[in-house]
Image (spheres, helix red, strand yellow):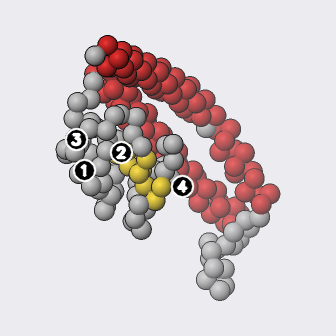
Amino acid sequence: MAAARGLRAGGCYRRRSLSSAASSSSSERPDSVGPGFRPPAHSHSDWIGPPDKLSNLRPIIFYVPPEESALERRLREARQEAQASNQRFWARHNRAFHQEKEEFIYSRLKAKGLEMRDESGQKATLNAEEMADFYKDFLSKNLKKHLQYNRDWYKHNFRITFLMGQVALVRALRWLRRRKKNAEQ
């Protein structure tokens, strides 16, 4: 079962890899994942890091087996590309959302003659109905971006699923050949 389990208090998780376990060696691991997020060199699994502050997505460091086939490499690279694309979209989207939300709150409070902070120093807020106007406008304004993201997401995931099927088929055929060869001996 490919269930993730917590390994240490730092928030890193490990899950079983698609690739077959091989000898321990140093794998390609990006430095951009975050401070303190470094799987051990002997790990044979993908590692999932703590959520990114901008995108809220958990970065993955993909295990690279020493004898990775060209097909397995294409699969890993497709997964990395999908992760990077999701990271870029959600970081940009969330940054724009927070900026526009602050501008909306500021303009509404200013229109009411209120300051950003009340007398006690607490940050002033708007009621749910007023915020609903912002959320509706923001979603309407970004509809085309969301539709394009969904199309891209489906493209990435269909490609990944297709490659996963190919990898599984190659592995099954390899296993059957080994089994047949062992039965003949």
Q: Is residue 30 visible?
A: no
Q: Amino acid at mark 2?
A: Ser
Q: Amino acid at mark 3?
A: Ser
Q: Amino acid at mark 1?
A: His
User: Residue drawn 22% across and 41% down?
Assistant: 23
Q: Which residue is mark 4?
A: 99
Sequence-earlier tag: 3 or 4: 3
Q: Position of residue 169 (x, y in %)?
A: 43, 18
Locate residue 37: give its quadrant.
Answer: bottom left
Sequence-earlier tag: 1 or 4: 1
SS class, disc 2: loop
SS class, disc 4: helix
Q: Amino acid at mark 4?
A: Gln
Residue at mark 4 to residue at mark 2: CA–CA distance: 38 Å
Instruction: Looking at this view, name the residue that lies furthest to the right.
Output: 129
For residue 14, above or below residue 145: below
Residue at mark 2 to residue at mark 3: CA–CA distance: 12 Å
SS class, disc 3: loop
Q: Which residue is mark 2?
A: 45
User: Residue drawn 34% across and 51% down?
Assistant: 33
Residue at mark 1 to residue at mark 4: CA–CA distance: 43 Å
* CA neighbours of label 2 inside 10 A, class few (<14), some (14 to 19), many (20+): many
For residue 157, above or below residue 95: above
Q: Position of residue 86 (x, y in %)?
A: 47, 39
Q: Which residue is mark 1?
A: 42
Q: Which residue is mark 3?
A: 23
SS class, disc 1: loop
Sequence-earlier tag: 2 or 3: 3
For residue 78, above or below residue 32: above
Between 117 and 158, the one nearer to me in the picture: 158
Relative side of 162 to 183, left or right:
right
Q: Is residue 116 visible?
A: yes
